[in-house]
Amino acid sequence: MHEVKIGANAPIAYDTYRTKVRQGAGTRGGNMAVTFESVRRMALALEKVEEGTSYGTPAFKVGGALIARLREDLDSLVVRSDFDERAELMAADPEAYYITEHYLNYEWVLVRLGRVHPDAMRDLLRGAWRRAAPSGRKTPRKRKGAARKR
């Protein structure tokens, strides 16, 4: 782990290596682990989100703007964020949220799927949708006919 100054000189730790998450790790208190299939359902339930690819991996976009994509390590999701939210997430749960040097100057956060709670993932995707949605529409709605499974 390395320390980097971000924003108002706050120290933020970030990984510089790909990290494989042990199967089932991070499901604190018996919480259900997030899978890419569950991310797919969450993302596609948001209005006008389409599935495509980015850097050769499955991705989700709204109006052509990327909101999230599977990382090449297949254990993490790259999610649109902002610097403040990213710093808060990483400080609160560095096992779930991190960045690599590549993302240091970009408003994205990396999320370990095996470590994040489904409700937190859903909230992250909604926030990413709001940041990327065409102007004039900043409230995500479920796609018509999209049923939310619990």
Image (spheres, rainbow, N blue to C red):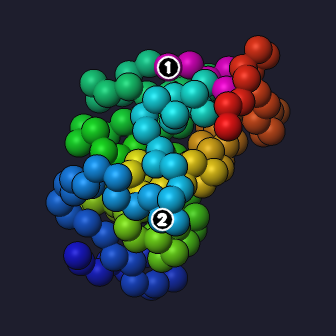
Please identify the quadrant where the C terminus is shown.
Answer: top right
**Badge 1: how crowded within 10 Å, few (<14), some, or many (20+)?**
some
**First-in-chain label (1 vs 2):** 2
Q: Position of residue 75 (x, y in %)?
A: 30, 45
Q: Residue at x 36, y 36 (%)?
A: 70
Q: In the image, is 33 to the left or to the right of 139? A: left
Q: In the image, is 42 to the left or to the right of 99? A: right
Q: In the displayed structure, would residue 45 be above or below residue 118?
A: above
Q: Are marks 1 and 2 in contact (CB under 8 Å)?
A: no
Residue type at numbered disc 1: Glu
Q: Between residue 85 and residue 31, name the one nearer to us.
A: 31
User: To which residue does mark 2 refer?
Assistant: 28
Q: Residue at x 76, y 14 (%)?
A: 145
In terms of image quadrants, where is residue 47?
top right
Residue type at numbered disc 2: Arg
The residues bearing labels 1 and 2 have C-alpha atoms spaced at a distance of 30 Å
Q: Which residues are magenta?
A: 45-51
Magenta segment includes 49: yes
In terms of image quadrants, where is residue 62?
top right
Given the current orientation, which residue lies at the most extreme left position?
17
Q: Position of residue 20 (x, y in %)?
A: 21, 53
Which of discs 1 and 2 lies nearer the camera? The answer is: 2
Q: Position of residue 118 (x, y in %)?
A: 57, 48
User: To which residue does mark 1 refer?
Assistant: 51
Magenta segment includes 30: no
Numbered disc 2: secondary structure: helix
Q: Between residue 137 and residue 78, name the one nearer to us.
A: 78
Q: In the displayed structure, would residue 130 be above or below residue 147?
A: below
Q: Residue at x 35, y 52 (%)?
A: 24
